[in-house]
Amino acid sequence: MNVVVVLCVVAAVLVSTLVAAAEVYIYADRGQSAERQSRDRYECHQWAAKQTGFDPATAQASPPSAPTTSPLRGAGRGAAVGAIGGAIGGNAGAGAAAGAAAGALFGGMRRAGQEQAASQQQSASAQANAQYERALAACLSGRGYTVK
């Protein structure tokens, strides 16, 4: 089998995976052959990745999130610390109650901060993917394809 044909088939499989990840639909306006389409898709993928600094083929999924702190867990920890402090002062119950309230407040604040950071990371990834898709569409449009 011709080496060029084999390379084109491999490139076509790779590019079809990449283009599917990019969520774009491509139509050959000028009757480009399947081999030409595969080559154009691959070259445009490389160009778009270089222009944007984002490659959906190598982009990592969201990393597993760190264990979040819940208000309930914070309340439990706060109550334990408060009980110790209250025992020293002569009223463990009052110390535990105050510690639980403070722990719940800080646990809730920490969790909100973690959720905001995860949301910002997802937003940045979506924005980078959108820029990549725009660059890919521009390249393919310039080569005679309709891209939606």
Image (tube, rainbow, N blue to C red):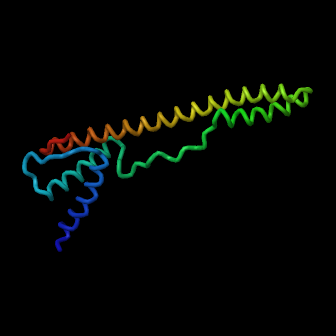
Could you tell me which quadrant the C terminus lies in? top left
Residue 18 left/right relative to 68:
left
Residue 97 sits in quarter: top right
Tell me if residue 98 comes above or below residue 48 in the rendering: above
Residue that protrudes farthest toward the bottom in the picture: 1
Residue 120 left/right relative to 113:
left
* Spot occupied by residue 26 in the image (x, y as percentages of width and height): 18, 46
* Spot occupied by residue 93 in the image (x, y as percentages of width and height): 84, 28
Residue 22 left/right relative to 41:
right
Tell me if residue 16 comes above or below residue 78 in the rendering: below
Q: Closer to the camera, 17 or 8?
A: 17
Residue 9 sits in quarter: bottom left
The residue that appears at 28% across and 44% down in the rendered structure is 23
The residue that appears at 77% across and 29% down in the rendered structure is 99
Tell me if residue 12 comes above or below residue 88 in the rendering: below
* Spot occupied by residue 111 in the image (x, y as percentages of width and height): 60, 33
Residue 37 left/right relative to 108:
left
* Spot occupied by residue 12 in the image (x, y as percentages of width and height): 23, 59
Residue that protrudes farthest toward the left in the picture: 31
Could you tell me which quadrant the N terminus lies in? bottom left
How many labels were placed on the picture?
A: 0
Residue that protrudes farthest toward the front in the picture: 93
